[in-house]
Amino acid sequence: MSTDTHDDLILSELNDKELILQMHDDLYDGLKEKIEDGVYILLKRDWKP
């Protein structure tokens, strides 16, 4: 996935399954900020740490 696609993607609009899959991709791409954003979104959705 290109950087432009990452920039256009709105993580909060993804359902939980899509968000987790995107976070896996972001982790392998070294996108620390996107992983942090995803964690905060999941916590707001009442996921437990």
Image (spheres, helix red, strand yellow):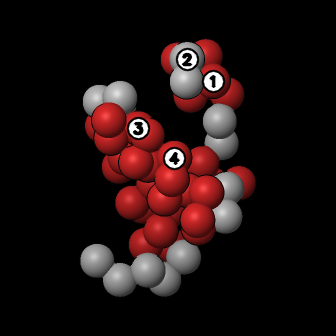
Q: Which residue is mark 2?
A: 2
Crowdedness near tag 3: few (<14), some (14–19) or many (≥20) residues, C-alpha within 10 Å:
some
Q: Which residue is mark 1?
A: 5
Label 4 close to label 3 by CB (< 8 Å):
yes
Dot placed on the residue nearer the N-terminal end, 1 or 3: 1
Residue 26 circle label? 3
Q: Residue at x 67, y 64 (%)?
A: 15
Label 2 close to label 1 by CB (< 8 Å):
yes
**Alpha carbon distance from label 4 to label 3:** 6 Å
Q: Residue at x 67, y 56 (%)?
A: 14
Give amino acid for label 1: Thr
Res 15 seen here: yes
Dot placed on the residue nearer the N-terminal end, 1 or 4: 1
Judge by depth and name the residue closer to the eye, 45 or 18: 18
Q: Secondary structure at mark 1?
A: helix
Give amino acid for label 3: Asp
Left or right for 5, reference 31: right
> In this rendering, is residue 24 above or below 41?
above
Horizontal and vertical percent position of residue 1: 55, 24
Dot placed on the residue nearer the N-terminal end, 2 or 4: 2
Q: Secondary structure at mark 3?
A: helix
Give amino acid for label 2: Ser
Horizontal and vertical percent position of residue 27: 33, 41
**Alpha carbon distance from label 1 to label 3:** 11 Å
Q: Residue at x 51, y 46 (%)?
A: 22
Q: Secondary structure at mark 4?
A: helix
